[in-house]
Image (cartoon, rainbow, N blue to C red):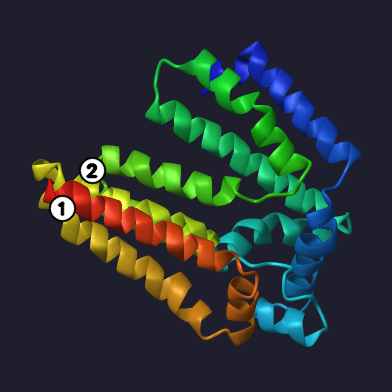
């Protein structure tokens, strides 16, 4: 990672990100995410969605689960304690996740340092989507990539935990689950560890998904965006494709 960070292309990408953080705030972050995080740390509860809705907040502000909230919570608290703008806590968390994803991809694709820096770190799609449009997809992407890296290391309990954490962060990550099933089905050497994988999934579900299921406001935010219907359709397509491959 040291060589990666010392590469000139990394410095260019980092400078672009810092300039965007210093000069602008995405509309979605300024109108929704940061105010939601502000309310959640001002009166700390385990159900910030209910607090937000009861305070008159819009139900489209934070359609994410516990994993996403917990990811942004530490630096939001630090910014609150320091009396600085919470937007920097939000933006620097996103930057940290961005660097973390680059590191995990580097571990997944060793020896492809220049390719990763060009294709990912300097990608205008990643930069614009995250720092201009205010999309938070880097968080579930990091958790999913980290899960895949643990599969490679045969740490399937951790891999299952991180996969469900990614789903908690953003529901659309559920489309990845059938691919894990297909992968385990086609790798006989890993089948003996599937129990560990499922144990990790269940442990994470008990921590993140079950409590969220009791938050009426959280469910309202998540399913009230209408995006969930597209997620479910896509997931069903993936399940069908997986079943077809197994049958063949």
User: Residue 190, image x and y in percent?
Assistant: 14, 46
Choose the circle earlier in sequence order: 2 or 1. Answer: 2
SS assignment at label 1: loop
User: What's the residue at 30%, 62% (across, down)?
Assistant: 200
Residues at discs 2 and 1 in contact (Cβ within 8 Å): yes
Crowding around mark 2 (Cα neighbors within 10 Å: few <14, some 14 to 19, many 20+) is: some
Q: Is residue 127 left or right of residue 112?
A: right
User: What's the residue at 73%, 36% (across, down)?
Assistant: 128
SS assignment at label 2: loop
Q: Is residue 4 visible?
A: yes
Up-down relation of residue 29 to residue 58 (above or below): above
User: What's the residue at 65%, 35% (across, down)?
Assistant: 126
Please tell me which residue lies in front, 60 or 19.
Answer: 60
Residue annotated with mark 1: 193
On the image, which quarter does residue 86 sit in? Answer: bottom right
Residue annotated with mark 2: 154
């Amino acid at each position: 990672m040291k060589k990666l960070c010392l590469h000139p292309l990394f410095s260019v990408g980092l400078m672009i990100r810092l300039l965007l953080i210093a000069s602008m705030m995405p509309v979605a972050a300024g109108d929704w995410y940061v105010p939601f995080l502000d309310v959640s740390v001002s009166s700390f509860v385990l159900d910030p969605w209910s607090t937000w809705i009861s305070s008159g907040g819009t139900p489209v502000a934070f359609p994410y689960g516990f994993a996403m909230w917990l990811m942004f919570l530490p630096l939001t608290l630090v910014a609150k304690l320091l009396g600085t703008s919470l937007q920097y806590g939000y933006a620097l968390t996103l930057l940290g996740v961005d660097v973390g994803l680059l590191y995990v991809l580097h571990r997944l694709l060793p020896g492809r340092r220049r390719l990763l820096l060009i294709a990912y770190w300097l990608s205008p799609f990643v930069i614009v989507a995250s720092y201009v449009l205010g999309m938070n997809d880097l968080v579930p992407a990091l958790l999913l990539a980290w899960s895949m890296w643990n599969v490679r290391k045969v740490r399937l309990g951790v891999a299952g935990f991180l996969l469900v954490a990614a789903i908690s962060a953003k529901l659309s990550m559920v489309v990845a689950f059938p691919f894990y099933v297909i992968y385990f089905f086609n790798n006989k050497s890993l089948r003996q560890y599937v129990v560990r994988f499922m144990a990790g999934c269940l442990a994470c579900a008990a921590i993140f998904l079950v409590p969220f299921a009791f938050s009426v406001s959280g469910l309202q935010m998540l399913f009230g965006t209408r995006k969930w219907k597209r997620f479910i359709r896509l997931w069903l397509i993936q399940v069908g494709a997986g079943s077809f491959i197994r049958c063949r």
